[in-house]
Amino acid sequence: MVPDVSTGSDTRGLIVYLFGPGRRDEHTDPHIVAAWDMAGAPDPGRDPAATYSQLAKRLDHHVDLRTRELGGKKPPQHVWHCPVRTAPGDRYLTDTEWAEVARRIVHATGIAPEGDEKACRWIAVRHADDHIHIMATTVRADGRRPRTNRDGQRAQAECRKIEAEFGLRRLKPGDLTAPRTPTGAERAKAERQGQTVTARHWLREQAYAVAAAVHNEADYFTVLQSLGIKVKTRLGPETGDVIGYSLAAPGDTNAAGEPVWYGGSKLAPDLSINRLRERLPDQKVADHPRYVADPAAPWRHTTTAIHTAHTVLDSGDDAAAQGHLAAFGDALYNIASATTGPHRAELQAAAMAFNRARRSATRADHQAATALRKAAKELAYASGEPGGLAIALLFATVHLARAAAKWHEQRGHAQQAAAAEEAFRHLQAAYQQAAPPVLADLTRRAPRAETARRFEQAVRAALPDHAARILADPTWTALTTTLAHAETAGHNPRRLLAEVGTQRELDSAEHPAEVLNWRITAQPNRRTQAARMRSATSGTSAMSATPHPPATPVAMRPEERSRHR
């Protein structure tokens, strides 16, 4: 059961909507199921003799009576509105049950506490099987305003109790960090235009993807505009600095043909200008090189940073952990944009799902996650997908998403835990699509038996407690190929196994050889590193003499834009 509290100033306009046919003639049998006084509240839906406009006017007069008693001057945003909808698949409630729901919610939110004779006037209208609308005027009989602080949270809490008592689907409790859901009007508009998502949802996804890739606030607005999105900034009256912004989707206009604007914070709490600045320090692009000598470096750096994030979740530093989860949300967008395989759709779905898990009531320490965010931004400008290393990164994301779900669950963040679990399922599906061909190729290219026996001895010496399970793992043969590559790259197999084997425990791993395989894959090539260091010290400064032109992040390149419209 989902309540959605909002306020406005047009009593009669809301009444007209509630008792009208709806925007698509979807309202059937609109009628009052509960009110502050059932005898005193005229019901437009139950009076066939009067015209509709007369009934709306009469009801408007009754509901707004308290404001008229104040001298006719209505306080701002005096109309309190709360649709309450059952979850898909729930049984339909009777009018009597909906009346109880309405009375409990106006009591819980402070609109009309039970037994308070001076409480606000309110009505609950049912015009569909699965929901009601509660409308109230927030002026009491004694002229005071009701105490409605945290009314949305209190309505949510009461709905959780009602679900349990009425045998309805138990939804996850919220913590006021969820983004606003699209309104019925927004959904209807999207359907009429043949769009699969609303403009609000589309803008939110674009804003997240752009924020994940760019390096500063100026780039954020520039890239959004390059996607055809209209940007309107709000400037401070004294300083002239940007203190807020709004976005409008291409072609999304109101009845007057004007753009429909959505403020950043109305798209999602962490898309407000202040929250964005915490993640996008005002640094010059030159401070962040967009080209790297080794194309595999961004993938390797991101994998290493994700392993670090996993460790931070176990550290007990909740602020740092929340910061890493926010950065991980950015990383998922950039991983998806840099991926070219058929599993890309699952990665995009994982990024969207994880958005609800990237923020909670725990304030994030974004500085603690600088390494992960920086690595993810490198990935946004990466060229090419380096085979096994991309799978190693994907493997790391699977485990971090599962760890994130557990972290949120332990702290009572039910909605975030569910979102992280959903992201985990998408990432797992992506891994299961992408990994088998790579593992099969490694198995085909296994080293000679003599070399494999030497690696077996290395495993027994470096990881004696796990050796039996590693050697019995079906992916052991693939691991021998990876060990051979690592040895060629300058690593000592025994020392390397000991090092990666202690990064995280292997006891709970179903396939320990598979875990080791991807950990080793992510290790840098020591011979290549040494060669680059020699080249750097030999005086090769010509590269710095000819600067590269600014790059466009993978997710925002022109050929990609049509996917998002």
Image (cartoon, grey):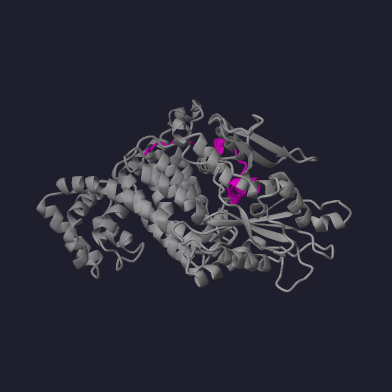
Q: Residue at x 64, y 49 (%)?
A: 19
Q: Nearer the viewer, residue 308 or 497?
A: 308
Residue 10 can be seen in this image: no
Q: Report if residue 5 lies within the magenta region.
A: no
Point out the stretch of residues depicted in magenta: 267-295
Most distant residue in the front direction: 49
> On the picture, is 189 further left or further right than 55?
left
- Name the image quarter holding residue 452: bottom left
Q: Position of residue 54 (x, y in %)?
A: 74, 47
Question: In this view, which residue lies farthest toward the right?
Answer: 71
- Residue 177: image quadrant is bottom right
In which quarter of the view is residue 144 placed?
bottom right
300 in relation to 311, above or below: above
- What residue lies at 36% left-to-right and 55% top-to-bottom? 425
Residue furthest bottom in the image: 115
Name the foreground residue: 378 vs 272: 272
